[in-house]
Image (spheres, helix red, strand yellow):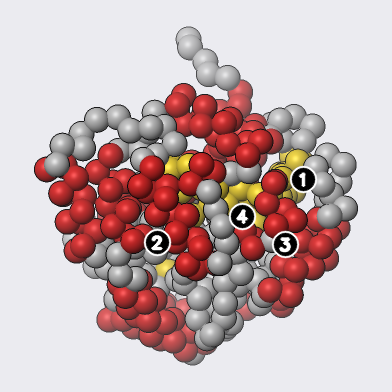
């Protein structure tokens, strides 16, 4: 009997894909399912980006590219970061990858090993903890609290750093909560990190273009005092509705860049050529499509928050970023995962239970409002009927 190494027994997964599969199965059986579980824009990729990908194929871009990505795309990333954040980023520090998860995978592999500790947001993207445990490192959850607007607390984060801490993972705007950490909190965290010069930082800013109510996104790239230990994660999936294209990018400090390049060579060789040329069009083209998409998400956000707060025993603070709401369902009498499962199986509404995002997610469920206003209203009506009839689980 063949066996695999024990580390693979520690790998978790992203339950949003399991919910997506189950929703698809129910739909195939003839059920009317409204999917508010998956974090995927329902808009198509903008036409000029699609055309750039098609043109690249017609122009013969069918072969391997450099492992770090084509230079025109790395330069486009540099221009985009200067435009949005006012920072200078050399194209030689940019690495093109097939989706944002690859940057997480690389960074956690670099710093995770038995005896090490890695701090990560909880509730947070489940792949953080999964990969930390795979490496044998100890995952240390940084509580992300509703009372703090689902922003991380600089003081609490710094208090969790020990002599074994190797990497700190941050995420704002955040999945699953929609929280946006204000600049004052980031300033305090960066100042405190001066006392911990051996701790690397992974800043997941994949939702950086999606903020509301005048809330600004403050990139950690703006802090020169940590640039030599900062790994920046971004990509096209959310901003340009390109989830299926699998296109991400990252910025690495000089001491880590060649290690990341070698991981790319060993893991995926390169990102497919046509997708990279589409990425150039996305970053260098008009950003009106992004503004229009965020404005539409903002309209849906208002519907979601109002509708959730009208549900029996449910409350929801207003998310300031991304396209997720994280309502508090603790007073419904249901455990969060059981409620999410029942909503799918009985009410035909797909959501994700908060514990799928960490131990501090109990009492919450995640809804994505990257779906149509019509479907959101239908889903809220179904949820209201269900909770009225099935209070207390």
* Residues at marks 2 and 4, CA–CA distance in whole angstroms: 16 Å
Disc 4 designates what residue?
A: 203
Sequence-earlier tag: 2 or 4: 4
Q: In the image, what residue occupies the spot 49% across and 68% down?
A: 84
Task: State the residue lying farthest toward the left.
Answer: 58
Residue that protrudes farthest toward the top in the picture: 1
Height in image: 267 above or below 4? below
Mark 2 surroundings: few (<14), some (14-19) or many (≥20) residues within 10 A: many
Q: Nearer the viewer, residue 197 or 331?
A: 197
Other-residue count near label 3 (Cα within 10 Å), few / some / many at <14 / 14–19 / ≥20 = many
Circle 1 sits on which residue?
Answer: 199
Q: Do the residues labelled 3 and 4 touch (CB within 8 Å)?
A: no
Task: Name the residue at 40% across, 61% down.
Answer: 238
Residue 280 image offset from top left, x and y in percent:
32, 53
Q: Could you tell me which residue is drawn at 46 percent across and 24 percent down?
A: 266
For discs 3 and 4, the disc positioned in front in the rendered view:
4
Q: Position of residue 256 (x, y in %)?
A: 63, 36
Q: Where is residue 385 in the image (x, y as percent from the top left)?
A: 39, 82
Label 4's element?
A: strand
Q: Mark 1 or mark 3: name the one nearer the start of the chain.
A: 3
Front: mark 2 or 3 = 2
**Disc 3 and disc 4: Cα gap in Å?**
16 Å
* SS assignment at label 1: loop
Lower position in the chain sequence, tag 2 or tag 3: 3
For the image, the number of numbered tags is 4
First along the sequence among labels 3 and 4:
3
Residue named by callout 3: 143
**Residue 12 in view of the camera:** no
Separation (CA) of disc 2 from disc 3: 25 Å
Residue to which mark 2 is pinned: 238
């Amino acid at each position: 009997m063949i066996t695999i190494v024990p580390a693979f027994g520690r790998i978790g997964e992203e339950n949003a894909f399991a919910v997506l599969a189950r929703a698809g199965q129910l739909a195939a059986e003839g059920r009317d399912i409204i999917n508010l579980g998956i974090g995927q824009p329902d808009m198509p990729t903008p036409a000029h980006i699609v055309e750039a990908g098609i043109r690249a194929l017609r122009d013969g871009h069918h072969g391997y590219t450099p492992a770090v990505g084509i230079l025109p795309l790395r330069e486009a990333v540099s221009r985009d970061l200067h435009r949005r954040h006012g920072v200078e980023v050399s194209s030689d520090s940019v690495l093109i990858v097939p989706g944002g998860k690859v940057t997480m995978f690389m960074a956690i592999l670099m710093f995770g090993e038995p005896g090490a500790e890695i701090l990560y947001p909880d509730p947070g993207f489940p792949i953080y903890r999964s990969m930390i445990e795979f490496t044998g490192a100890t995952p240390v959850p940084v509580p992300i609290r509703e009372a703090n607007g689902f922003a991380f607390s600089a003081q609490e984060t710094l208090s969790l750093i020990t002599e074994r801490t190797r990497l700190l993972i941050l995420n704002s705007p955040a999945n699953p909560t929609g929280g946006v950490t204000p600049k004052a909190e980031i300033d305090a965290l960066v100042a405190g990190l001066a006392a911990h010069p051996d701790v690397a930082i992974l800043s997941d800013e994949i939702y950086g273009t999606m903020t509301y109510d005048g809330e600004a996104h403050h990139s950690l790239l703006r802090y020169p005092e940590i640039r030599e230990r900062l790994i920046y994660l971004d990509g096209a999936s959310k901003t340009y509705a390109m989830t299926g294209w699998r296109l991400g990018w990252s910025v690495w400090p000089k001491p880590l860049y060649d290690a990341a390049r070698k991981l790319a060579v060993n893991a995926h060789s390169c990102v497919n050529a046509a997708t990279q040329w589409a990425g150039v069009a996305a970053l260098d083209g008009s950003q009106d499509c992004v503004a229009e998409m965020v404005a539409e998400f903002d309209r849906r956000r208002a519907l979601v928050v109002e509708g959730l707060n009208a549900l029996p025993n449910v409350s929801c603070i207003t998310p300031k970023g991304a396209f997720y709401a994280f309502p508090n369902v603790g007073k419904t009498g249901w455990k969060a995962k059981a409620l999410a499962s029942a909503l799918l199986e009985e009410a035909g509404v797909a959501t994700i239970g908060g514990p799928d995002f960490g131990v501090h997610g109990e009492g919450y469920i995640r809804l994505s409002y990257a779906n149509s206003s019509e479907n959101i209203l239908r889903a809220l009506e179904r949820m209201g009927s269900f909770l009225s009839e099935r209070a207390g689980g």
